[in-house]
Image: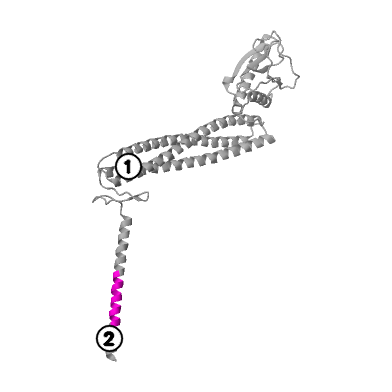
């Protein structure tokens, strides 16, 4: 019985030993297969030259081969990396400047709206609170102007990056024709060429966006400068006008305006045949009679001139200082001086409203039908 048990024990031991040995062999084969697969997945298509560096590029193994072309690949790869960093920084600067411009524009229009609302409700001439708000609006517009300048400088930088990218593309294409390389070098050069091509597209889009923004913001700032000038005149007189005459949208057509008088007197006939040739046979658009101090003519003048320009955008104006012809020599001379001073004031008002100086001619004359110094404005 004991002998039988010993034989069973030996058989079990032998079986157990055989099983353990088989298991060890299977584990060894699996480990070897795993190492083979890992080596196959991690290695490049071609074995690098001894002493060459290794690395990855865009998820692909483009280890330097150590060949003449391989060294060129390393140089081009470094140039591409630096150029990408520059373009990333330029894109971030563009986005930042655009956000600052939006913020300043919103603040500017908010302040201008507050000023116009106060003028609409009515306020005192030269209200210091409105002057303070006007100064704030000017600062916000100055900020937009500074951003436009910064966009111009950024455009120069992007232009330099575009030239660098074009040169990099040419260098990469030239390297493809070099001798002394292997297939792995060609693969790496093709990848650099593709990345450079995509970078060129990105730079071109950034350049286009910069050009559009610089043009758009330059026109915007120029128009708002004119509007601020007109708004300053409105604050000075405590009246609400509108946008600068220079920034209005015009639709050409013909008009036959009637003269506007500011002393509420009835309409007067056209100058007689004996009047100066400067006003002979012409019907004035506006007649301002300075028969009292501080004649409030600005609002009516703005309305009359704006109406003409809306219909005839290229219209010019003749501004005539008219003094009475009657009286003593001293009285005539004094009236002529007053008329010229009044005309200069009206000219400054028109300029402040946005009408360019080259659209206005100024002259002086005397008229027998003028009882007080006048300023007459004619459509040229």
**Which label was assigned to residue 7?**
2
Image spot of residue 166 (x, y percent): 37, 36
- Packing grade of label 2 (10 A; few <14, some 14-19, many >=20) is few
Q: Is 101 in the magenta?
A: no
Image point (43%, 39%), residue name: 201
Image spot of residue 153 (x, y percent): 44, 35
> In this picture, is 301 found above or below 209?
above
Give the residue at mark 1.
Answer: 76
Q: Can residue 129 be seen in this view?
A: no
Q: What element carries label 1?
A: helix
Q: Which of marks 1 and 2 is in front?
A: 2
**What segment carries the magenta color?**
11-25
Q: Is 20 in the magenta?
A: yes
Image spot of residue 306 (x, y percent): 65, 25
> In this picture, is 63 found above or below 108?
below
Image point (29%, 71%), residue name: 24
Q: How much space separates mark 1 and mark 2, taking CA atoms? A: 76 Å
Look at the image and tell me in which quarter the C terminus lies.
top right
């Amino acid at each position: 019985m004991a002998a039988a048990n010993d034989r069973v024990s030996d058989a079990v031991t032998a079986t157990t030993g055989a099983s353990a040995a088989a298991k060890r062999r299977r584990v060894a084969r699996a480990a070897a297969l795993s190492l083979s697969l890992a080596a196959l997945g991690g290695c490049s298509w071609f074995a690098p030259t001894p002493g060459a560096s290794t690395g990855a590029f865009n998820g692909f193994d483009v280890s330097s081969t150590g060949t003449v072309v391989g060294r060129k690949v390393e140089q081009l790869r470094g140039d591409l990396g630096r150029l990408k960093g520059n373009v990333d920084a330029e894109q971030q600067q563009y986005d930042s400047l655009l956000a600052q411009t939006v913020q300043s524009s919103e603040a500017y229009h908010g302040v201008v709206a507050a000023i116009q609302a106060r003028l609409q409700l009515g306020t005192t001439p030269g209200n210091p609170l409105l002057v303070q708000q006007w100064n704030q609006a000017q600062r916000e517009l100055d900020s937009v102007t500074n951003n436009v300048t910064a966009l111009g400088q950024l455009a120069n930088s992007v232009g330099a990056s575009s030239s660098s990218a074009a040169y990099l593309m040419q260098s990469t294409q030239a390297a493809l024709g070099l001798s002394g390389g292997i297939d792995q070098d060609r693969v790496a050069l093709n990848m650099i060429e593709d990345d450079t091509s995509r970078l060129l597209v990105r730079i071109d889009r950034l350049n286009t966006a910069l050009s559009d923004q610089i043009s758009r913001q330059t026109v915007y700032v120029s128009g708002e400068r004119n509007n601020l000038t007109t708004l300053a005149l409105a604050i000075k007189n405590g009246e609400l006008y509108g946008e600068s005459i220079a920034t209005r949208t015009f639709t050409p057509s013909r008009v036959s305006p009637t003269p506007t008088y500011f002393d509420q007197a009835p309409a007067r006939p056209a100058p007689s045949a004996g009047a100066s040739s400067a006003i002979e046979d012409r019907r004035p658009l506006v007649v301002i009679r300075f028969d009292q101090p501080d004649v409030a003519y600005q609002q009516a003048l703005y309305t009359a001139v704006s109406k003409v320009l809306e219909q005839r955008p290229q219209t010019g104006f003749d501004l005539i200082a008219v003094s009475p012809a009657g009286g003593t020599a001293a009285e005539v001379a004094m009236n002529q001086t007053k008329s010229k001073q009044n005309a200069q004031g009206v000219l400054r008002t028109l300029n402040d409203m946005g009408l360019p100086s080259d659209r206005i001619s100024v002259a002086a004359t005397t008229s027998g039908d003028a009882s007080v110094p006048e300023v007459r404005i004619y459509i040229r």
